[in-house]
Amino acid sequence: MSTPDTQRPRTGADILRTALRRNIGAMAGGTALMGLYQAGETAFPIALGLIVEHALRDRSPGALALSIGALAVIITTVSLSWRFGMRILQKANTTEAHRWRVRVAACGLKPVARDVDLKSGEVLTIATEDADQTADIIEVVPLLISSLVAVLVAAVALGLADLRLGLLVIVGTVAILSILSVMSKRIGTSTREQQARVARAGAKVADLITGLRPLHGFGGNHQAFLSYRSVSTEAKHQAVTVARVNGVYAGTALALNAILAAAVTLMAGWLAFAGRIAIGELVMAVGLAQFIIEPLKLFSEMPKYVMIARASAERMALVLAAPPVTTPGTERPEPGGDLEVDGVRYGTLRRLKFQVSAGEFVAIAAYQPRVAADLAAVLAVRVPPDAYEGAVRISGRDLADLSVEAVREHLLVNPYDAEIFAGTLRSNIDPPGTSRTVSEAVEASMLTDVVALHREGLDYGVRDRGANLSGGQRQRLSLARALAADTDVLVLHDPTTAVDAVTEQLIARNVAKLRRGRTTVVITSSPALLDAADRVLVLDDGVVTAEDTHRNLLAGDEEYCLAVAR
């Protein structure tokens, strides 16, 4: 049976219930300490009232010393309970937000249902902002309960002085919460819309960054900017609307709390003037009327935070509850196997069929770039096996029968535009820190000059997306990472398009030498890589039209010669 942590939440309410259930211990401890804090805060004006009452009656130094000691105990209790209570709750909050971030990110790395139209930028926003706001429910509930404790203690204390004072606090609190709960629904609706528009703006930014160079190339950067400005403006207007609604809510809550405090103060003054309560009780009532504003403010803000957490949880449920496009298998291929593409029809591929034996180095020259991209997408499992005709096999096992983990372990497809991450050269080449072939991969990819250029060597800092590296350096860094992975089957898609001819020649020889005895496929039009391969497959219009060594094809195939000769 699945545990609540591993079950797929279907709604935002499921997510909130899961978060509350697995943090029940921390919330109980935090609630107890925060309740003690609020009780101590409430006890302070009560103690002052008692001190005034006894000081007027007894007028003894002993009673004064005892009163000062009582106040010191109350202050110490308030300080320590707040410190440790918030520490427990914030730790639980941070841990819970991390758990949801990991789950959303894990779903983002796998295909989700086609009817959920979420781009990578939107998933990123959900995994960060929405995860944090959902986890805030861990703090909201204990603070709500502790604020209720403060209001009840104040109501009881005032009720003991005079029943009308206690009833005024209770009735006023219920009226305030009723008004604010209606307003909080508007906040939830506005916040949900704002989060959606901010996520769309984030997705647009991610798309623009990815396609920035091509946009500059054909002069489309201005139009792209106008498109982003439109999306960003919508998000800004919605943010202003949310801020306006929040401002009205906060102002209304503050005004209602102040009215209640003023009403308690005026009634206490009237009762004292009429002789119904003593001077000490008047001091206590005035102190409680001033103090009660803070827990009432906190108490009245809780519905807003609950609605925000619920809106964020609903957005996370869009990702977490979405079924995958395909259900992966559970089998594993044999190590060191071959690669077979059997009658695959997808996009521009027309019943493509070829086989690469174990340990063979094969180059694929695709005359149409789209054909190369479709083949790389199929091999990288970016296209689910049931979305195309035919089959792709590793060691005789269909991809559809293999688990995603097994495919990633045995088959690596390195795209021409692989991401470079913020960190160091070493962390980009060997992210898990387990590769034993980092130095060989650096040498084979001709990244040695980049390493030698900086005194930090492999520990040289790399900015996000490799902003402080040239195009050729980024490409060689990506190639080094693919080679360091040392997988059974390696597929490289245009790994040398950004390097000069001399470096390309050296890389081709080095890759062939390093990958000797391991299955390697290079999708390329580079003469150096084509020449280094054991054989070349020519793809034209989605099918294999020729197969031979590079030099034989150059000598006997004029179309091939025109396509790859430089």
Image (tube, grey):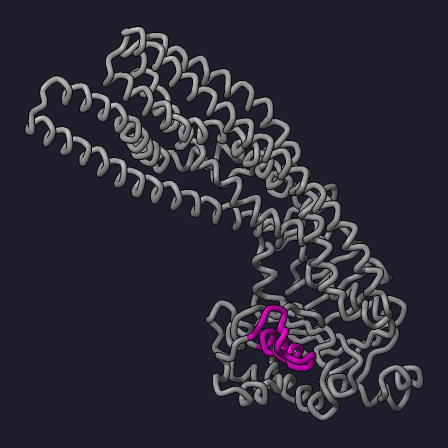
What is the span of residues highlighted in magenta in the rendered image? 462-483
**Is residue 524 covered in magenta?**
no
Residue 353 at x, y percent in the picture: 80, 66
Instruction: Residue at 55% x, 72% y: name it.
Output: 428
Evaluate whether residue 10 shows in this view: no
Residue 493 shown left or right of residue 282 in the figure:
right
**Is residue 468 covered in magenta?**
yes
**In front: 60, or 164?**
60
Q: Residue furthest front?
A: 273
Residue 409, picture quadrant: bottom right
Q: Main secondary structure of the magenta part?
A: helix
Residue 218, picture quadrant: bottom right
Q: Residue furthest right?
A: 558
**In front: 261, or 28?**
261
Instruction: Residue at 88% x, 72% y: name it.
Output: 540
Give the vertical position of 170 relative to 204 (above or below): above
Residue 134 at x, y percent in the picture: 52, 39
Evaluate whether residue 254 shows in this view: yes
**In front: 534, or 207?**
207
Residue 79 at x, y percent in the picture: 27, 40
Residue 208 at x, y percent in the picture: 74, 61
Residue 362, picture quadrant: bottom right
